Amino acid sequence: MTANARQNPGRRWLGLNWQISPTSGWGVLGMNLALQAEVDGRFAVVPFVPTDAPNALPPQYQTVFDRVLARERIAANLLAQHPDERCQCEFPVVHTLGNRLASNDAAERIVGTTNLAIIFSEDTHLPPHSLDVAKRFKWILAGSTWNRDVLRRHNVRNAETFLQAVDHSMFFPSDQPKAPGGPFLVFSGGKLEYRKGQDILVAAFRKFHQRHPESILFTAWHNHWPKSMIGIDRKGYVSGVPAVNSDGLLEITPWLESNGVPRGASHNLGAVPNHLMPKVYVQVDAAVFPNRCEGGTNLMAMECMASGLPTILSANTGHLDLIDERHCYPLTHQQRADVVAPFAATDGWGESDVDEVLDLLERVYRDRTEAARRGAAAAQFMRDWTWRRRFEQLVGYLD
């Protein structure tokens, strides 16, 4: 089966072989690459995987995404008519890779004139066959400098760095001062799991809330893959995992209450579409990301920094591309993190110190002037991290 781009004369199609979504990191990456392609005009993105929650895509870009979704339907019909055939595309295709260079079945079935792969990998073990996988792609674009270096140490010679970005039309510092005497809001985002280190924050926030009863923990911890939560209690900071209700949502608040965070001292945001997150960030006093590992640069942390929030970051792995004491609060006390399933090796991961998280929260709380200065510096630092630049970089790898 051959897929061509005759439906779009004058523009080359560009296949995206993963799901666009407003509520996941991969999905937001695809969403913004598709948007930039439409603005740029040289390429017309065609997604090969049905878009998740298309009605929750940013409404200001609805006209653009209507065109993208129309091409998605063309591709879906073509694939459905030939369910058992390999699709040889007459245009380039960008694929995804995960831990140990694992790809989805579609990457084997759909082949472009040029094949790139974007990877966010946390497992530092690469089995021998992964080098054969790497050879299928012209370039493997790693989501952080750390991720690229891990690949190169395993002789993946076509690995380069491809950092994420921020939509600065949505994520920027608020010009509205926070009302004095209100609650102190601490934000934490990312799917709930051991790798993201939310258990470390829970342990620190328990102590912080005892000192400052007006503090509230805002969580955006929805996890589309609940099995990956297993092991978050490994270090003993928390017990068990949240229940999943009949709607597939995590019962975060009761779980936090059972782990010492009083009801009323936390607010579970659930799965928030990306374009609604600015309404959350504008209320926040501090953002905390004590992650044990990030294969990329942590999209939510980047959005917080671009929004001018004082941001506490673990100084390890992908976060190292973001960290500078002048514009964030680095967690520098990093111990070696345990190896937990499904990961085979965790070289370079970091175990943040609960007391250091608590100390940095106290610094933000007690010195709001310095916190505001670092937040403003973070927003300035992020100004160059634009999706337009990232799309130009991607196009360069296609040539």
Image (cartoon, helix red, strand yellow):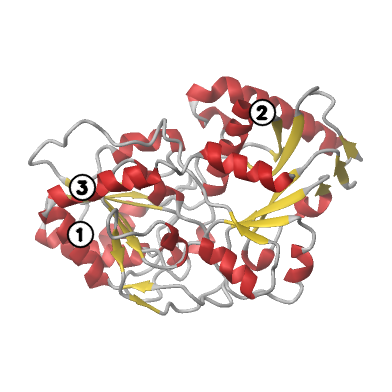
**Distance of label 2 from label 1 (alpha carbons):** 43 Å
Above or below, comparing residue 144 to residue 396 in the picture? below
Whether residue 18 is visible, yes or no, is: no
Q: How many marks?
A: 3
Q: Which residue type carries mark 1?
A: Leu
Which residue shows up at 60% across the image and 38% down it? Answer: 33
Q: Position of residue 327 (x, y in %)?
A: 29, 53
Q: Helix, strand, or loop for circle 2?
A: helix
Q: Quadrant of residue 389?
A: top right
Q: Position of residue 140 (x, y in %)?
A: 68, 58
Residue indicated by mark 1:
361
Residue indicated by mark 2:
68
The image's mark for residue 106 is none
**Distance of label 2 from label 3 (alpha carbons):** 40 Å
Q: Residues within 10 Å of mark 2 (few under 14, many from 20)?
A: many
Which residue shows up at 32% across the image and 39% down it? Answer: 280
Q: Is residue 176 left or right of residue 66?
A: left
Q: Residues within 10 Å of mark 1 (few under 14, many from 20)?
A: many
Q: Which residue type carries mark 3?
A: Arg
Q: Position of residue 59 (x, y in %)?
A: 49, 24
In the foreground, 186 or 335: 335
Q: Which corner quadrant holds the N terminus? A: top right
